[in-house]
Amino acid sequence: APDFPPGAVATSGLAITYTSSDTAVATIVGGNIRILGTGTTTITAAQAGDANYAAASNATQSLTVLPAPTMITINDRTTGTGLNQFEYFATAVAWKVTSGQAGNYEDDFTESATAGDYAQIRFTGTKIALYGKKKPDSGIAGVSIDGGTESNADFYASTEIKMAKVWESPLLPYGTHILKVRMKNVKNAASTGYLCRIDFVEVKNDSALSYDSIFKEAE
C-alpha cells in the first residue's frame, strides 16, 4: 500500500509529529504512515506547543493491517481439536462417514439426522462458507458463529446437488472463530427426511486496513 497521511489537525496550526507503537507493522516516513507488515499498532499524534500555545495532549488511533487475501478449503474428514479441524459431537449414534462418493469434495461427506448432534470447526479469517450434499431427504441445520444467533442452513433440494453451498457467514472481524452446525430435526415441507450431509468449508481472509484518521486534539 502507498504511504498515507495520518490525518491529525492542530487547531493551533503548529506542527504535529507521529510515532508508531509497533514499527514492524507501520512506521512514519516524512510525516506519512508506511505499512511494513500485518498486525496492529497504535499511531500517536503529538503537538509540543510553543511560546503561545501549550502542548496538546497526545492523541492515538489504532491501525490494523490484515494479511493478503487467502482462501483455504477444509474437508469434512479433517478432524481434531485444533485450528481448521472438524469436531463431531453425537448424542447417541456417531455421525456417519460415507466414502467413495464421486463428485463430492475428496469423495466423501459426513452426515447426521439426530437432533442435538453438532459439528464445529475453529478457523482464522473473515468469512466462512459451509458446503454439503443436497438431496430430497435432507433437513435444516442451525448454524452459528462464536455462540451467536443461529441461522438456517437448508440441505434440501428436489434433486441431488453435490458440493452445494448451504450457508455463508457475514463478514467477520479478523481473528479466530468457531463455526457450529447443529442438527435440529427440522426440515423443508417438501423434504422426506432430516439428514444433513457436511462436505467441506471454505475459509476466507479478506485483506483489509482498518484506520480512523480522525484525531482529537486537546490544547
Image (cartoon, grey):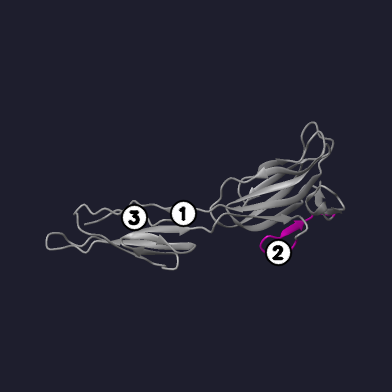
- Name the amino acid, label 2: Thr
Q: Main secondary structure of the magenta part?
A: loop
Residue carrying label 1: 209
- Extreme residue toward the left, this view: 51
Residue carrying label 2: 81
Element at label 1:
strand
Distance Cα–Cα, label 1 vs label 2: 31 Å
Q: 10 Å neighbourhood of mark 2: few (<14), some, or many (≥20)?
A: few
Nearer mark to the viewer, of 1 and 3: 3
Snapshot quadrant of residue 196:
top right
Element at label 3:
loop
Q: 10 Å neighbourhood of mark 1: few (<14), some, or many (≥20)?
A: some
Element at label 2:
loop
Residue 84 included in the magenta stretch of the image = yes
Question: Which residue shows up at 58% across the image and 45% down it?
Answer: 170
Residue carrying label 3: 5
Nearer mark to the viewer, of 1 and 2: 1
**Closer to the camera in the image, 150 or 53:** 53
Residue 169 percent across, percent down from the top left = 62, 46
Snapshot quadrant of residue 82:
bottom right
Distance Cα–Cα, label 3 vs label 2: 44 Å
Q: Which residues are magenta?
A: 79-93
Quadrant of image for the N terminus: bottom left
Nearer mark to the viewer, of 3 and 2: 3
Residue 186 percent across, percent down from the top left = 76, 39
- Of mark 1 and mark 2, the one earlier in the sequence is 2
- Name the amino acid, label 3: Pro
Quadrant of image for the C terminus: bottom left
